[in-house]
Each structure stands twice: as structure tokens, then as C-alpha cells.
Amino acid sequence: PSTELKKDTLEMEMKEAKSERKEKKNGSKRQRKTCEEMVTSVLFNPKLFSRPLQNGVDFLLVGEHKKTVKLKNNEWTEFKFGVYLIGDEITVTADCDGWFIKDLGQVKINTSHLWIKHHTSTIDCSGLGHHSDSGPGKGGIFTGIGKKQWYVGGGAGHGSKGAEFDLSFGCGHGKGGDVYGEETLLKQMFCGSGGGSSQNENGVWKGGRGGGIIHLVVQQQLINGGTLRCDGLDGESHAGGGGSGGSILIQLHSSSDTCPHTLGAISCKGGNVSGGNEGGCGRIAIYGSQISDQELKLIAPLPFCKLQK
């Protein structure tokens, strides 16, 4: 951000803190705006703000359909006045090409509001984790020598152990990858690992890539009508092991009684879901909101949850 924007942001934060102290002293509650109210404000009521706001700098509003927005990889992107994905089939992801082994995808957003309106839209870092045969929970590579049968790669591990092919079907298959990381995601966040490679008479088949990382800090309201996703990918021909899911950390800084949150669909699944060598799940942690049983049905795997921010 420019020096001027940093100065404006600092001044706004100081005013906000002063206002909070005053309201706390007077025993009053702050009036927070919902996502819809904020969209109306930034589009049609510019006089509410001390200076003109710029889309893509002060806020991000995407109204077009079938659009992909790439944010800086593994860097905090701050939108003081919210992120609003209003169109259909919008994908927000990390700006990394994925060709380099160490190029792992991470989306990190700090914003006042986050609204994903349609079920077809997503913040997605699936397949942006470790490549085949790599990562702390990498799936085992095939060990068979002959080429007249399949030697299947093991699924990668992360939040759970990767699956491995039933050895009763023969030897030479890769082992499932190990569990790593910790459930709170506050000490360190990990990408998913790559599945193990497979072999048959036609050649070697790579394991699926692991999922990347999404870290969201939302100051006022989250409405997720789409999907937050960091899934692992399928292995080639499903013989390569499935990649393991990545990590999603959500930190909500306002109570849901002032601006109710909608967590929506959140996924850190492993690849090769229906195979015998599927990748392990990733990890999800959510802070600052109670999660109902109905909401839990849309979140996989089950998240670590804590009301305290």
C-alpha cells in the first residue's frame, strides 16, 4: 500500500479504537454494518467516507461472472472496506503458477467484510500444496519392480493418515503418508502433501498435489454463500496416491449477535476420495463464532473451534 493509504488506515484504526473506548465507557454498543449495507455504501454513498475509495485497493467488489481473481501469493492482502464477490462463478486464488516445487499457494486476506454471494463462487487453493512424492506427509511411492501389473501409490497424510492399497492384492504398493501439524493452526499452518507415484506397463503415474492454505481475518461480517476450499487433488489415473487437504484458518473479530455470520461450505478433503489410496484430510480452525450442527454438515473435516479470537 502507498504511504498515504497506510496513513489513512492508521488514522482510521486510531479513530475506531477511540470510538470503541468511548462506547465502552458509556455502556453503548457499536452499530456495525452488514455486507449488503457496506456494498450500498461504497457504491452509492461515497460521501460517507473521508476520501474516495478505490476498487481493488480499499475494497474488492467483483460483479462480473466467470472471473478469476489472483491475489499475491503468501502475502497479506488488506481490504479495509470489504471483499464482495457478487457475480456467478468467481474464483479467488493465489497468484502462483505451480510449476516450481517450492511454489506453494497461500491466500491471506484481512478485511472488514467478506461476502461470497453465489454457490458457484469460491476462494480456492486446491492443488496448490506439495507436488507428487513430496511434503511432510507424502504418500509412499510404488516399490514393485515388474511392469505387468499396477503398483499403486499411497495417499498423502496431513490431518489424518493417507490411505494405502490393500496388500492382499499384491506387494509393491506405496504406504499411506503420516499425520503432521496441529489442530489450532495458530503455531504453524501447513499445505497438504503430494500423493505417492504409481507404475504400470504404460509408465509412471504421479500422485495428486496437496491443498494450499487460506487464512481469513474478518473484522465485522462473513457471509459465505459459496465455498472455501483447499482440497488435495486426485492422483493420475487414480493409481497415483491422492494429495492431502491443506489448511483453512478463519478468525472472526465481531460477535455473531451484532452481524450474524454464515460460515457456509468449507472443505479440506484429500484426493482420490473413492479410491483405496485416498489422501488424508487437511485441517480447519474457526475462531470467534459458534458453529451449529447444521453448519457442521457443510464443513469437512470437522473444524477446531473456539469462541475466543
Image (cartoon, rainbow, N blue to C red):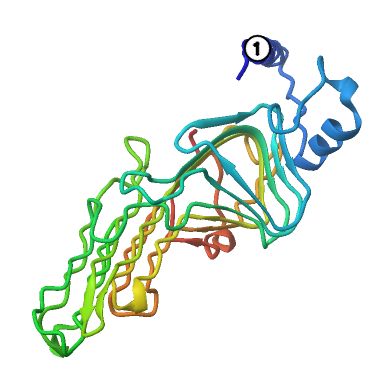
- Indicate the secondary structure of the residue bearing disc 1: helix
Most foreground residue, 216 or 20:
216
Question: Which quadrant is home to the N terminus?
Answer: top right
Is 302 on the left or on the right of 224, as rendered?
Answer: left
The residue sitting at 16% across, 90% down in the picture is 148
The mark tally for this picture is: 1
Is 176 on the left or on the right of 308, as rendered?
Answer: left
Q: Estimate the x, y position of residue 274 in percent, counting from the top left.
A: 39, 79
Is 91 on the left or on the right of 233, as rendered?
Answer: right
**Residue 145, relative to residue 12: is it above or below?**
below
Amino acid on which the number 1 mark rests in the picture: Arg
Q: Estimate the x, y position of residue 125 in percent, counting from the top left.
A: 48, 52
* Residue position marked by numbered label 1 in the rendering: 21
Most foreground residue, 35 or 84:
84
- Crowding at dot 1, Cα within 10 Å, few <14 / some 14-19 / many 20+, comes out as few
The residue sitting at 36% across, 57% down in the picture is 210
The residue sitting at 34% across, 54% down in the picture is 192
Most foreground residue, 306 or 54:
54
**Residue 253, relative to residue 202: is it above or below?**
above
**Residue 268, relative to residue 307: is it above or below?**
below
Inspect this view and state whether residue 152 appears.
no
Inspect this view and state whether residue 47 appears.
yes
The residue sitting at 44% across, 60% down in the picture is 231
Q: Estimate the x, y position of residue 157 in percent, counting from the top left.
A: 27, 60
Q: Estimate the x, y position of residue 112 in percent, counting from the top left.
A: 66, 31
**Residue 38, relative to residue 285: is it above or below?**
above
